Amino acid sequence: MSKLFKINDKDNVAVALEKLKKGEIIDNIKLLDDIPFGHKVLLTDIYGKTAERQQGMKFG
């Protein structure tokens, strides 16, 4: 079971389902900081004008 939850497969943002520790690797992503339960995690690097996606919709 993943420790992250994405609503839509197109999303590049997920929600932490438990407290996550810096350096932990989850779904091939190395966490750069501690992530509290319920906080959002960006799943990809964002360059230029690439928008974040949540619930399949762009924002930010």
Image (spheres, rainbow, N blue to C red):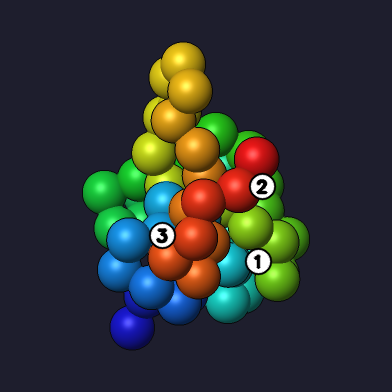
Front position in the image: 58 or 7: 58
Mark 1 or mark 3: which comes first in sequence? 3
Q: Position of residue 14 (x, y in %)?
A: 51, 62
Under tag 2, what secondary structure? loop
**Residue 60 marker:** none
- The residue most toward the top is 48
Q: Which dot, 1 or 3, sits closer to the camera?
A: 3
Query: At 61% across and 74% down in the image, what residue appears?
Result: 18
Under tag 1, what secondary structure? loop
Question: Which residue is disc 1 drawn over?
Answer: 19
Q: Are marks 2 and 1 in contact (CB under 8 Å)?
A: yes
Residue 7, picture quadrant: bottom left
Q: Is residue 27 left or right of residue 13?
A: left
Question: Which residue is disc 2 drawn over?
Answer: 34
Front position in the image: 5 or 33: 5
Q: Callout 2, which amino acid?
A: Asp
Q: Residues within 10 Å of mark 3 (few under 14, many from 20)?
A: some
Question: Disc 2 versus disc 1: distance between alpha carbons?
Answer: 8 Å
Question: Which residue is disc 3 drawn over?
Answer: 11
Mark 2 or mark 1: which comes first in sequence? 1
Q: Position of residue 45 (x, y in %)?
A: 42, 29
Q: Which dot, 3 or 2, sits closer to the camera?
A: 3
Q: Callout 1, which amino acid?
A: Lys
Question: Disc 1 versus disc 3: distance between alpha carbons?
Answer: 21 Å
4 is higher (above) or lower (below) than 32: below
Question: Disc 3 versus disc 2: distance between alpha carbons?
Answer: 21 Å
Q: Position of residue 29 (x, y in %)?
A: 35, 45
